[in-house]
Each structure stands twice: as C-alpha cells, then as structure tokens.
Image: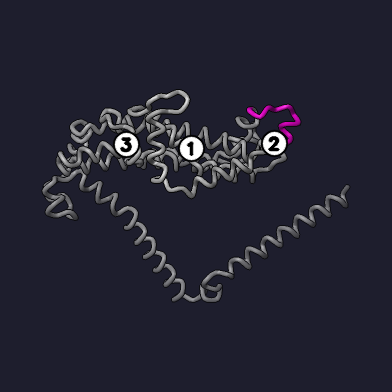
Amino acid sequence: MEQGMSATQTLIARAAERRAERKRDDAGRGIVSTLDLQRTRTRVGLVVIAVLALAVLAIASLGPLLWLAKSSVSTTQDILTDPFGWWPSGIQWHNLSEAWTRLGIGGYFLNTIWVVLGCWFFGLLVALTGAYTIAILKPKWAPLLSGAVLVTLFIPGVVSLVALYVTVLDLPLVHLNLINTFWAVWLPSAANAFNIMLLSRVFAGLPQDIFEAARIDGASNLRIFWSILIPMARPTLGVVSLLTVVGAWKEFLWPLLVLPDPSLQPLSVGIQKVAGTNDLALVLAGMFISVILPLVMFLCFRRQFLDNAGLGGAIKG
C-alpha cells in the first residue's frame, strides 16, 4: 500500500513538474523574449504602448456614453452651439424628470421590461430544451434537428421578415392575430438558433458520466435537466441571458412592425417617434435613461451572470 501511495505521489510530482515546465516555455514564447524584458527601454516602451491602447479603447467605448450623459443635462442651445462644452448654461437636472413624464419614457420603459422578460424566458426555454434534446437525450433524429437549426443561421433575418409577419397575422392552427400583443415579439425571438447551438455544444462537452450515474440512480430526464444540467451550465446560461436581454432591449424593426399601438411600444421605438417633435435636450435625456438602466442592471447582476462555478451546483445537489 505504501509503495502504491509513493508511486502515485511520484506520478503527481512529475505531472506538476511537466506543467511548470510548460508554463515556463509558454512564458518565453511571446512577442518579446525574456531577455528583452530585462531591458529598461523595452519595459517602458511596452507600458507606454499598453497605456495608449487602453486610452484609445476607453475613448472609443466610453466617449459616446459620456457625451450622451453630458448632453442629457444640458440645454438644446448648448448642445447645438458648443457640443463639447462643459455646461455653459449650467447643469439641467430637470431634463431627466421631464423626459420621464413629458416624453412618456416611463411607459416605454415598462413596455421594454415586459418585452425583455418575455424574450428572456421563452428564449431560454427553447434554447435549453432544444440543446438538451440534441446533446443529452440524443434521439435518432437529433443530427437532422441539429442540421436544420444550423441551416437557419445562414438565412438573413430580412429574408424571413415577410413570412414571419404573415405568420403572426394569422397564427397557424389556432388562427389568432398576434399584432399589438407582446406575444408577437416573444415567440419569434424564442427561436434563436445561435443560442440552441451554443448550449448544445456546451452540453455535449460536459462529463457524460454524471448523467449516466444519475440514470442508474433512477433519476428521470426532467430531474437530470433541472437538478444537474442547469447548475452545470450556469455560466453559459448567464452569457446567453445577457445576449438575449441586450438583443431584446435594442430591437427596433420587429417591434415597430408588430406593435403599432404607441401604448405598447418599447423604448427603442418610442424614442424614435418622439424625437422629431420634442426638444433635443429632452430626447437625449430619454436616450440616456434607456442606455444607463440596462448598464446598471448588468453591473448589479454581473456576478450572477458570469462568476458562478459551472460544476459546483451539480456536485452540491
């Protein structure tokens, strides 16, 4: 027994040494060699390049958002005459409250919340069940289903726009008109081929021994799906959820077509309609509200979306 333990320890030590050697080899395979990094001029140059690159990225990504934030509390005259000036006429905090009430941003925002929640729920439902069927249950027709889903990725959305609109005008089998209902936005967005293929690839890469052991213990397919698969795929579900929420939040053309009633339109459509007949400062304040709220939501729930351990939940369950 002691000899077996010592042999095992030796193998573990050798594996650790090999990993350390690979890390050292990888460290010396960069664009700049270890010898060059020992030179002060090279290190200073790399720091300067990194700072400049980060500054360019920060300006490109945060610049428009910061300008929108500044303009949302400025007067229209200041925006037109001095767009980059620092509030020549003072900060107009009342623009945000007036945009919420006068432009109806509050109603548009509530409609957007309903649209996003429905798209998120039905999108995850279809993506999870479809990927579970393709990657875990693996029926005989799973390759055919996977190929059919993959083919839809190569069809431009504009091509299927007319057919989709005719479908929601007269839903097959039940013959319902979904125009001016949130169902007209929820149901088409649920059929997202990218999410199905992404989750199916992730599910296929999970340890299959866990599912086999659960079946041997008598767990049903529903039990495996709810108690094992979902906790294991939690980080990927966070990414899919974030992509679905952002996509539903910024969608413009489809809600414009299927929600002609202004009382049902989301922010992306409502702000565009009030832009031509209202004060520019109020319109920019409304745009800032529509941008900052999803950003705050992401920062608040970032840990839940991206920082969960993939296998921890399944092992604990």
Predominant SS of the magenta segment: helix
Q: Which residues are magenta?
A: 210-222
Q: Can you say which quadrant of the picture contains the C terminus?
A: top right
Q: Earlier in the sequence, mark 1 or mark 3?
A: 1
Residue that numbered label 1 is attached to: 191
Tell me the number on the disc at residue 211: 2
What separation in Å lies between label 1 and label 3 (alpha carbons)?
18 Å
Which residue does the image show at 38% across and 34% down from the upper left? 166
- Dot 2 alpha-carbon crowd within 10 angstroms: few under 14, some 14 to 19, many 20 or more: some
Q: Is residue 176 left or right of residue 73?
A: right
Q: Is residue 91 left or right of residue 244?
A: left
Q: Position of residue 315 (x, y in %)?
A: 66, 36
Look at the numbered disc 1 and give the secondary structure of its residue. Answer: loop
- Dot 1 alpha-carbon crowd within 10 angstroms: few under 14, some 14 to 19, many 20 or more: many
**Residue sitting nearer the eye, 90 or 284:** 284
Q: Is residue 9 visible?
A: yes
Q: Earlier in the sequence, mark 1 or mark 2?
A: 1
Q: Earlier in the sequence, mark 2 or mark 3?
A: 2
**Three-letter amino acid code of the residue under disc 2:** Phe
Circles 2, 3 touching at the beta carbon (< 8 Å): no
**Residue sitting nearer the eye, 76 or 176:** 176
Corner quadrant of residue 234: top right
Corner quadrant of residue 227: top right
**Three-letter amino acid code of the residue under disc 3:** Leu
